[in-house]
Image (cartoon, helix red, strand yellow):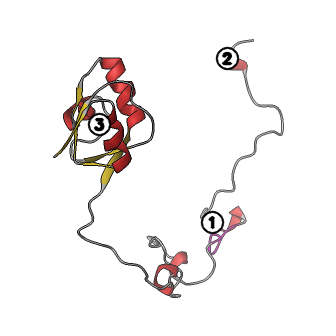
Amino acid sequence: MNLSNLKPAAGSTKSDKRIGRGQGSGRGGTSTRGHKGAQSRSGYSSKLGFEGGQMPLQRRLPKFGFTNLKRVEYKGINLLVLEELAQKSSLKSISVDTLIEAGLVNKNARVKILGNGTLSVALEVTAHAFSKSAAAAIEAQGGKVTKL
């Protein structure tokens, strides 16, 4: 026996009904597409969210809420992460550039230092924003907080 002799077990495979192959195929005439209407035509493709002319869901539901165009998004970095980074690379100061090089933040992101975790070393930290607990924890260890 070799690869050229292999074939599926008898009766386990079955060829699909071929659509649009004339009257003798058992699916002649409309070729399973029904009568008239857009879906029976060649070249038909429905738009995303199209519900056959019925008012689509995204237009039936009311709009709500408010989007503040001046909102500033920050990428949160916890003290726990700073601690690990400082120990791994033996750093005394951490800036946004350091975080970018470490792959923790995007180069366009604004960084906010958050107070989850503890510090065991004095660090000079430079970022766009700090939570009160994070700033207190950094300064308690003899570190320095600098806002950009």
Left/right placement of residue 114 relative to residue 7 reads left
Disc 1, SS = loop
Q: Compare residues 131 and 75 and report the one nearer the observer.
A: 131
Q: Going 31% across and 32% down the picture, which residue do you hit?
A: 103
Given the image, on which type of amino acid does mark 1 rest? Gly
| CB within 8 Å, label 1 to label 3 | no
Q: Position of residue 58 (x, y in %)?
A: 47, 79
| Label 1 or label 3, whichever comes before in sequence order | 1
Residue 117 percent coordinates (x, y): 45, 36
The residues bearing labels 3 and 2 have C-alpha atoms spaced at a distance of 72 Å
Q: Is residue 33 magenta?
A: no
Picture residue at 38% right of the left edge, 36% below the top: 79
What's under tag 3, amino acid-wise? Glu
For disc 1, the neighbor class at 10 Å (few under 14, some 14 to 19, many from 20) is: few
At which x and y percent is residue 6? 72, 22
Bin the neighbour count of mark 2 within 10 Å (Cα to Cα): few under 14, some 14-19, many 20 and up: few
- 81 up-or-down from 23: above or below: above
Question: Would you name the residue on which mark 2 appears?
Answer: 3
Q: Is residue 115 above or below residue 102?
A: below
Q: Which mark is residue 139?
A: 3
Disc number placed over residue 108 in the picture, else none: none
Element class at badge 3: helix
Of badges 3 and 2, nearer the viewer stands 3
The disc, 3 or 2, on the residue closer to the chain's N-terminal end is 2
As drawn, is 54 to the left or to the right of 114?
A: right
What's the residue type where badge 2 is placed? Leu
Please give the range of residues in magenta: 27-32
Q: Residue at x 69, y 56 (%)?
A: 17
Any mark on residue 22, and which?
A: 1
Q: CA distance from mark 1 to mark 3?
A: 83 Å
Which quarter shows the N terminus?
top right
